[in-house]
Image (cartoon, coloured by chain):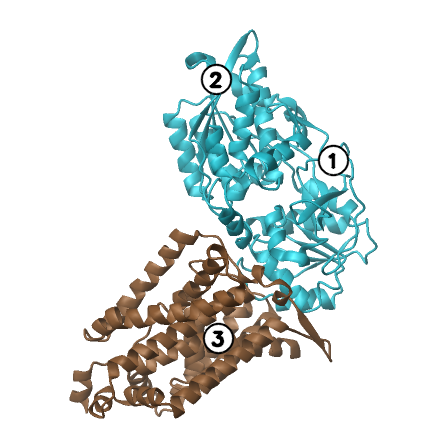
């Protein structure tokens, strides 16, 4: 029991990193990136390629992947996402859905369908562990992953709170037009946010490939976990995302201690319970459903600008 | 041709790629058709050789082009059958590790290549669809390297009823071999005889649950089955905790090969690997590349093997002893030998023997009848279709092996034969030791 909780918390660190990127794009660029899980897998494959083809040491490969992912994010936002955003709320969804399919098939074409793991290159770190009191065992790698997650989310929070670009991001997230009136280049801010989100996705993908393994089609499952962590933790808060990730990890881990097949089921169950509780706090049944849909739509900025003005 | 074969085994990047993927291999560029320098037409027996040569199972076909070259050299003067000599022409087909593709390749080759016989090997996902296509087309087919129960019962035969197959024949180990092997191998080191079983929710895992586990229990082991799980699982906390609390000193698994390193690393992380004395892999752990990916955590793992260079047999189709076969493969291909090299050599050995014993190798009925009565020596030992467990099947033996850190040489791992109860002709080459983390 205790062990399941500890493992779940550590697993939550990974979920928090992958969810933070999704949450950031949702908040600042205002669309759901359905290719987020595939981008995570892309990050893992880029690291594998850097090791296999460039012969780089593992940690150098990781260091190389992050700026490459940021560059891809910047470029895609500049030349693809920004254009689709002008076409209403559905177009970016479709574009990222298509991007996901392209990534999956592209990775299979280039790297083949075999499962691959970064753990093969990390020597003893991939399995080293500590024995703690109460018969508790924790792995070094999960602890490092969790620590990295906390540092990354903390750093991001500091950046959002205290730097100029961070303030510009929060302003753009609240109201892009008003932010532009104040001299913020909203398009540039969105590019920066996308670049950061892609970096987070790449980092999460490498964590996944270190802990376990990846295949070209592993992305959509990771997207679902990221989504659940975002919803459980609450949209728009980095620390909420961390809490959401931990809650998801603990639920899965406790579920798995009942039966191996309960691992995912328990996570989904928690997700629905949280959704139900949030709905019940919104008033009488019919109305609160409508309010909740409205809230989701609002949070996800699914309404176009014109509609929102009209409604206001 | 020799140039093509050398190309197939080139390069450092391919080796790195292999290390990266437990079972991975880039596509082998195999010559589509390999001819022995013998007459065409009626005097040549055309054999379709279908196997996985690219994709996740590609490593099974790693030695195929090398073998074909050796056979072409050794049988340059053809095969004597009755009072005639026949040339041998091998036509290679690649399943790309996909069962659907395997069936399609088999059908295409049967329709367009004017074949007299089809041979195939490596996993039920390859053998079963190819055999089904041959059975449907009335094409004689010989196969190996898939448990014979998967080949026989997995394609619709019923226990106790006559065999429904007329054209397809198979030789390999089966569940019975596992029972004999494990009972002996697990008794070589002192344990509490409590066995943790990790078997997924797939055809192999469920077959193991139904057929092997009761037999192991009857052999005096306490079986703790962690229950079915999905292939590709990334978190094994529940299974590890169960085995640890039940103090299973023997661990036996039948995973999808890439899942094994994930499990075993987590087991070491959580202190279970430190408790295990026998870690018996099946399905995983066939190839050195998988062990190299695990590094020092792989020293001392146990497995079963269907071929080893120290098998005291000679491959009649290549004219090489098992030891020479492995050495020649390492010299030509530039990679460590693997078990499938010997198994595929045995398939070619049996093919040559069947051609030699057929009353007319160009007649399909005569060829099928020769297969049904085939009894010959191969690189994996004697195979005998007249005394098989069921019609259409013959069994071969398994030896117990242990992967150890190589004392010298270019390769990281050596494979010791530690148990021969199921294959008494093969000498034991080392004393089995308990598993200890990092050897």
Q: Chain of mark 1?
A: B
- The residue under label 3 is A15
**Which chain is assigned cyan?**
B
- Decide if residue A70 is on the left or right side of residue B362: left
Q: Is residue A278 above or below residue A102?
A: below
Instruction: Pick whichever, B170 or B48, lies toward us.
Output: B48
Crowding at label 3, few (<14), some or many (≥20) Cα neighbours within 10 Å?
many
Mark pair 1, 3: CA separation:
50 Å
Residue B423: mark: 1
Q: Chain of mark 2?
A: B
Q: Quadrant of the N terminus of chain A?
A: bottom right
The disc placed on residue B22 is none
List x then y, in percent, for residue B242: 69, 67
Kind of element beneath mark 3: helix
Q: Quadrant of residue A101?
A: bottom left
Q: Where residue A176 appears, x then y in whole percent?
A: 24, 86
Q: Which of A193 and B305 lies nearest the eye of the viewer?
A: A193
Q: Residue furthest right?
A: B190
SS at mark 1 in the image: loop
Dot 2 falls on a residue whose secondary structure is loop
Who comes first in sequence, dot 1 or dot 2? 2
- Label 2 neighbourhood size at 10 Å, few (<14), some (14-19), many (20+)? some
Residue B343 lies, with reference to residue B223, above or below; the image says: above
Give chain A's shade.
brown
Q: Position of residue A89 (x, y in %)?
A: 23, 75
Residues B273 and B62: in front is: B62
The mark found on residue B37 in the picture is 2
How many numbered dots are placed on residues in this image?
3
């Amino acid at each position: 029991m205790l062990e399941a909780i500890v493992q779940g918390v550590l697993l939550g660190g990974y979920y928090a990193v992958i969810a933070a990127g999704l949450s950031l794009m949702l908040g600042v660029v205002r669309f759901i990136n359905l290719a987020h899980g595939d981008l995570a897998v892309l990050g893992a494959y880029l690291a594998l390629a850097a090791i296999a083809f460039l012969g780089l040491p593992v940690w150098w490969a990781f260091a190389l992947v992050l700026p490459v992912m940021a560059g891809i994010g910047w470029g895609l936002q500049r030349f693809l996402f920004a254009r689709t955003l002008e076409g209403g709320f559905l177009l970016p969804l479709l574009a990222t859905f298509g991007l996901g399919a392209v990534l999956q098939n592209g990775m299979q074409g280039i790297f083949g369908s075999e499962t691959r793991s970064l753990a093969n290159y990390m020597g003893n770190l991939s399995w080293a562990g500590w024995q703690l009191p109460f018969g508790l065992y924790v792995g070094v790698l999960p602890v490092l992953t969790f620590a990295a997650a906390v540092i990354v989310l903390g750093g991001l929070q500091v950046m959002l709170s205290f730097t100029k670009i961070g303030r510009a991001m929060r302003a753009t997230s609240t109201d892009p037009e008003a932010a532009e009136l104040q001299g913020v280049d909203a398009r540039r801010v969105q590019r920066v946010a996308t670049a950061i989100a892609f970096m987070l996705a790449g980092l999460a993908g490498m964590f996944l490939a270190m802990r376990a393994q990846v295949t070209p089609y592993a992305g959509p499952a990771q997207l679902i976990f990221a989504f659940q962590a975002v919803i459980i933790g609450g949209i728009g808060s980095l620390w909420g995302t961390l809490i959401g990730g931990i809650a998801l990890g603990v639920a899965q881990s406790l579920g798995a201690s009942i039966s191996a097949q309960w691992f995912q089921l328990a996570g989904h169950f928690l997700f629905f319970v949280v959704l139900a509780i949030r709905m019940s706090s919104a008033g009488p049944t019919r109305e609160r459903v409508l309010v909740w849909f409205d809230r989701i739509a609002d949070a996800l900025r699914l309404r176009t600008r014109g509609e929102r003005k009209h409604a206001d | 041709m020799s140039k093509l074969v050398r190309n197939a085994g080139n390069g450092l990047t391919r080796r790195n790629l292999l290390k990266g993927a437990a079972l991975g291999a880039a596509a082998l560029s195999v010559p589509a058709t390999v001819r022995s320098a013998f007459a065409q037409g009626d005097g040549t027996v055309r054999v379709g050789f279908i196997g996985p040569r690219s994709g996740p199972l590609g490593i099974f076909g790693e030695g195929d082009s090398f073998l074909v070259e050796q056979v072409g050299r050794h049988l340059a003067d053809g095969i004597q059958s009755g009072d005639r000599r026949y040339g041998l022409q091998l036509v290679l087909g690649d399943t790309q590790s996909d069962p659907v593709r395997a069936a399609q390749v088999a059908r295409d080759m049967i329709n367009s290549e004017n074949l007299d016989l089809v041979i195939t090997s490596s996993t039920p996902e390859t053998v079963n669809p190819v055999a089904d296509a041959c059975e449907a087309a009335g094409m004689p087919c010989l196969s190996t390297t898939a448990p014979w129960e998967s080949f026989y019962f997995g394609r619709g035969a019923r226990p106790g009823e006559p065999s429904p197959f007329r054209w397809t024949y198979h030789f390999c180990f089966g569940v019975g071999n596992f029972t004999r092997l494990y009972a002996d191998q697990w008794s070589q080191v002192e344990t509490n005889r409590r066995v943790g079983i990790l078997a997924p929710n797939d055809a192999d895992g469920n077959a193991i649950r139904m057929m092997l586990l009761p037999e192991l229990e009857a052999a005096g082991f306490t079986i703790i089955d962690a229950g079915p799980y999905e292939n590709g699982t990334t978190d094994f906390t529940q299974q590890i905790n169960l085995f640890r609390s039940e103090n299973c000193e023997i661990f036996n698994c039948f995973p999808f090969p890439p899942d094994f390193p994930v499990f075993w690393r987590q087991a070491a992380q959580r202190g279970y690997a430190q408790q295990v004395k026998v870690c018996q892999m099946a399905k995983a752990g066939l190839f050195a590349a998988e062990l190299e990916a695990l590094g020092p955590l792989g020293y001392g793992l146990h497995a079963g093997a269907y071929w080893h260079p120290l098998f005291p047999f000679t491959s009649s189709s290549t004219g090489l002893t098992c030891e020479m076969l492995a050495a020649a493969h390492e010299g030509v291909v530039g990679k460590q030998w693997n078990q499938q090299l010997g198994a595929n050599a045995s398939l070619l050995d049996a093919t040559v023997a069947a051609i030699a014993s057929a009353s007319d190798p160009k007649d399909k009925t005569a060829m099928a009848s020769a297969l049904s009565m085939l009894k010959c020596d191969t690189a994996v030992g004697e195979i005998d279709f007249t005394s098989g467990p069921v019609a259409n099947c013959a069994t071969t033996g398994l030896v117990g092996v242990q992967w150890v850190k190589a004392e010298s040489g270019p390769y990281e791992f050596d494979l010791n034969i530690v148990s021969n109860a199921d294959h008494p002709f093969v000498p034991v080459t080392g004393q089995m030791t308990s598993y200890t983390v990092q050897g």
